[in-house]
Amino acid sequence: MTQPVNMARLHQAYADYHQQIFKDLPSTEHDESWPSPCEQGEPNKLNEIKWLAVERSPAGHLNDLARALETQFPDGLNGLYGDFFAGNIVAFIEGKQIELLQVWNEDDFERLQQNITGHILMKRRLKQPETVFIGLTEADDLLVSVDIATGQVGLEFVGKKQHHVLADSIAEFVEKLTVNYPI
């Protein structure tokens, strides 16, 4: 039995943390040509827009992409990217800060699929285990990725194999994430 990815819990925790610490919703740079259903209000003087995760209906999925790449994505990848429109989430795991990539709008979901395709084709060309990147770290070339064969979430340098496992599944990874700065 597969464990569902609880993105609703993570999005709620992220919004609550921002309300508690910053007395406001999370925000990101505004681009009027790149609207999102998760935008809240108008851009501020710094051209930032507040956002709140919005459930997608119907949910997006990566099944067609998996078929096109002749692969099967690990459980949880659809939930990670397909259940909500939202800004990226800054979170922590094992004392490391990461930025968990999220889908801003339908066009962003299409762009994500193009990026996943490029990443997988690069891995094939390098004859490395295939991964899907799901986040960034503070280091410029260190990615958070999911190994397609095992479903494990780990760290990998661009162009290299995963070298450190953070969780055995996407669902476990999401449950391990915290949104408050670790003390």
Image: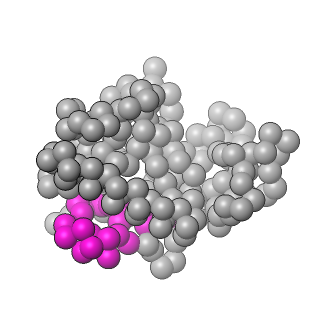
Q: Is residue 45 visible?
A: yes
Seen in the picture, residue 173 relative to 92 is either above or below; the reply is: below
Instruction: Report the side of 137 relative to 43 (left or right).
Output: left
Farthest right residue? 45
Q: Quadrant of the N terminus?
A: bottom left
Image-quadrant location for residue 20: top right
- The residue shown at (19%, 45%) is 126
Q: Nearer the viewer, residue 57 or 16?
A: 57
Relative image position of residue 46 (x, y in whole percent): 80, 39
Q: Which residues are magenta?
A: 61-84
Q: Nearer the viewer, residue 152 or 8?
A: 152
* Figure coloring: one colour
- The residue shown at (63%, 40%) is 18
- The residue shown at (69%, 46%) is 29
Seen in the picture, residue 17 relative to 80 is either above or below; the reply is: above
Q: Does the magenta-highlighted stretch encompass residue 75? A: yes
Image-quadrant location for residue 66: bottom left
Relative image position of residue 52 (x, y in whole percent): 63, 56
